Image (cartoon, helix red, strand yellow):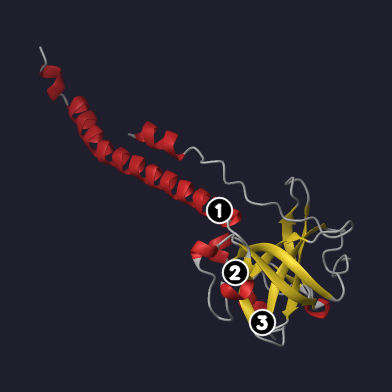
Amino acid sequence: MYRFLLSRQWVILTLVGLVLIPVMIKLGFWQFHRHEHKVAQNQLIADSLAAEPVPVGKLTAPGRPVPHDDMWRRVTAQGTYDTKDEVVVRQRTSADGRSQGYYVLTPLLLDDGRAVLVNRGWIPADGNLTEFPKVPAAPAGKVSVLGRLKEDETSGYSGIKDKKGLPPRQVMLINSGEQAKNVHRPLLSGYIELISPHAKGQPELVPAPDHSEIGPHMAYAIQWL
């Protein structure tokens, strides 16, 4: 009655099934681990944003990468903006994701003789990508800023290709190691994503990260299993 199970077709289907079972189990656990990573990342962001701000110099130093656990931590800094070494970061989108433009990256010269990069926000592209865009002037004099601490961008981490031969004062990545060549004082690793102060006419602030979305990974894990 069940002799058909010994036919070539059923033997092949059985072997294929036996091969696919461990593959699907492995894919299921892969998606589950991605879910766990996303949940942990969301919790890290939530904890960092809720923590009391600390001086930026307590969490980072020149040549020392920003610790992963300090990512998104709110930090403070006091100093004066160095607009002569200001650059813009190409191919960045507005908060609503609809428009292309630049991030404005300005060194803040700290009172202790060091400096830190501040992402002052987003401005739209003006159509001429070969020239330095018109950038709202940074506040003059001594300022106190509040922002989120971010680690240096790399091509591997961000997925953004670091193109060469760009117009003067334009970059693809926010990287303190590269900008330290232009800032003539010790530059803290990472950068500050500005929260305040923010006045009318200044670059559009980068919004805080969304840490409520966990993604579809758990659903995918169940499907594979």
Instruction: Name the N-terminal-most of marks 1 and 2.
Output: 1
Residue that protrudes farthest toward the front in the picture: 52
Q: Which mark is residue 152?
A: 2
Residue 153, how many percent across, how many down? 60, 66
Please say if the residues under marks 3 and 1 sit with CB atoms less than 8 Å apart: no
> Camera-side residue: 160 or 152?
152
Q: SS class of the residue under badge 2?
A: loop
Q: In this orientation, does residue 217 appear?
A: yes
Q: SS class of the residue under badge 3?
A: loop
What's under tag 1, amino acid-wise?
Answer: Ile
Q: Nearer the viewer, mark 1 or mark 2?
A: 1
What's under tag 3, amino acid-wise?
Answer: Ala
Q: Nearer the viewer, mark 3 or mark 1?
A: 1
Instruction: Name the N-terminal-most of marks 3 and 1.
Output: 1
Q: Which residue is mark 1?
A: 45
Task: Indicate the quadrant containing the N terminus: top left, top right, bottom left or bottom right.
Answer: top left
**In the image, 137: left or right of 69?**
right
Identified at 12% across, 24% down, the residue is 6
**In the image, 150: left or right of 27?**
right
Task: Indicate the quadrant containing the C terminus: top left, top right, bottom left or bottom right.
Answer: top left
Residue 214, how many percent across, how many down? 51, 41
What's under tag 2, amino acid-wise?
Answer: Asp
Residue 190, how many percent across, how many down? 61, 71
User: Vertically, is 209 above or below 197?
Assistant: above
Q: Which mark is residue 71?
A: none
Disc 1 from disc 2: Cα separation: 17 Å
Disc 3 from disc 1: Cα separation: 27 Å
User: Vertically, is 218 above or below 138?
Assistant: above
Q: Which residue is mark 3?
A: 180
Please say if the residues under marks 1 and 2 sit with CB atoms less than 8 Å apart: no
